Image (cartoon, rainbow, N blue to C red):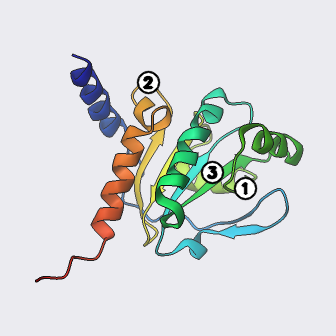
Amino acid sequence: MRTFVSLLLLSAAALVAGEHTGRRAPGFALPDSNMKFYDLADYRGKVVLVEFMQTDCDHCAAFVPVLSQVQQKYGARVAILSVVNGQHDNATKVRQYIAGHKVTYPVLFDQGQMEYSYLLKGTVNNPYLFLIDGNGTIRNDWEYGPFTRDVFESGKALFAEIDRLLNANAPAAPKK
């Protein structure tokens, strides 16, 4: 029964995911709290996770260990970029969040333009995650909710999507 429920949740997550799938990921160049800029074009050829989050979001904080597992499992093959809206968060709050949750990937500042270009709407439930392939195409996206918990809480559905994407881009084994 437990397996059935897990499969049902994974299937439901797949159904509610992907509202922006298949379109080109909008470009951006955003600073972190140290004014180092990150440009999506610099990650061409890599899988990129772009997470929209807030420092006072409990679900965002609970997602940090999953993203840390992504870093450990995939290393340099997958880049992680978190984005906060500077209208809600400031450099002090972000530094405290990074230190308190031991975040090891960049947290970038947006004033809302980049978020809008990705979501095409003004409000969002955080966290919101985009999976972008090495060619800059959005391959999947998830908004936190009851049907996407296997993405944000356990990471099972996220790891499955990353594996699928990396395996699809892997060179074919030489024929013997």
Residue assigned mark 3: 115
Residue assigned mark 1: 108
The amino acid pointed to by label 2 is Pro
Residue located at (76% from left, 52% from top): 111
Residue located at (53% from left, 66% from top): 76
- Secondary element at tag 1: strand
Report whether 86 appears left or right of 156.
Answer: right
Residue located at (60% from left, 30% from top): 59
**Residue 83 point in image, percent of width and height:** 67, 51
Mark 3 or mark 2, whichever is nearer to me:
2
Q: CA distance from mark 2 to mark 1?
A: 27 Å
- Secondary element at tag 2: loop
Q: CA distance from mark 3 to mark 2?
A: 22 Å
Q: Considering depth in this image, is 120 or 161 the residue closer to the camera?
A: 161
**Residue 170 point in image, percent of width and height:** 31, 71
The amino acid pointed to by label 3 is Glu
Report whether 35 appears left or right of 108.
Answer: right
Q: Are circles 3 and 2 on residues that touch, CB within 8 Å?
A: no
Q: Considering depth in this image, is 73 or 86 the residue closer to the camera?
A: 73
Count of picture labels: 3
